[in-house]
Amino acid sequence: MNRKTGFFGKLLIVLVLLYLYVPIVVLMLLSFNESRYNSLPFKFTTHWYQELAADTELINSAKNSLLLAFLTGIVCMILATFFILGQRYLAKRTQGLFNSIVMMPMSIPWLIIGLSILLMIRFMGFSKSMFFVAMGHIVISLPYSLLVLRARVSSLDKSLEEMSASLGASPWTTFRRVTFPAIAPAMLAGGFLSFLISFDNFPISYFLMPNGIFTLPIEIQSSIKFGFTPEINAISTIIIGISLVCLTVVGLIMRSNLKAMLGGKD
């Protein structure tokens, strides 16, 4: 009975993985298919990537997304560090309230958040701008940086900071020499996660982006109204590649972080 249960459990996992990832693999293969209409037989070509390089609208949208995601990742990494280190000096009840407020965007649909921010800036008499887009991305991405960083900070040995202070080190010196080296991997991992959340976000950008400026998800959504094109397959493949690289980096950072927490044991 246990063998049968184990077999069907593994089979279910394989089927779920195939359901999730086979369409992605098909999309990536079609980006190298010669046919414009994604028809068979398959003939390898890189022509659509050359066409993509000449598509200024997609390229400019990709640059906007990268810049926005990079800014979001940096800001979330810095804010998460200040929040996590600062809340250690708060009362437990205040910490709980603080965590609930900061983590709330994870439980609210991004569509609702984007619409709420749009209504707020309209009520206040402001126009849509990249500033509000960036603020929206930071709001929804910050909790992910906080989660990663909190796990690392909770495992820190506070006696190291206390010893540093007892030896006459200033708070800044203690942070620079003791705390920062210990939490730097988690800071980077949280920044990468925030980068991914921002880069792929559609609802916030859709509601708050000013006229004439597009991010890559918005540009792709506008393009597929008239049907999928090989250029969309190509840019989607590049996005998948960027996401895999970022996730790999996060995984390596978190692995080294876990080893540090366990005292270097595998």
Image (cartoon, grey):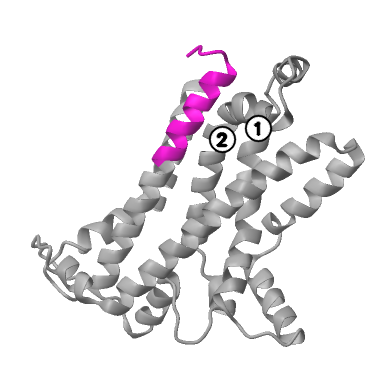
Give how far across and how far down residue 103 sits, in percent: 73, 51
- Residue in view at x 29 percent, y 65 percent: 235
Q: Position of residue 27 (x, y in %)?
A: 28, 61
Give the CA separation, mark 2 to mark 1. 8 Å
Residue 229, compared with residue 77, is above or below; it is below
Residue visible at 80% across and 34% down? 88
Query: What span is colored magenta in the figure?
Result: 248-266
* Residue 238 appears in view: yes
Q: Position of residue 265 (x, y in %)?
A: 51, 11
In the image, taking residue 50 as reference, residue 160 lies left or right, namely right
Q: Nearer the viewer, residue 266 or 80?
A: 80
Mark 1 residue element: helix
Give the residue pinned by disc 1: 151
- Find disc 2 in the rendering and name its residue: 186
Tell me, yes or no, whether the two marked residues, 2 and 1, touch with CB atoms within 8 Å. Answer: yes
Q: Residues within 10 Å of mark 2 (few under 14, many from 20)?
A: many
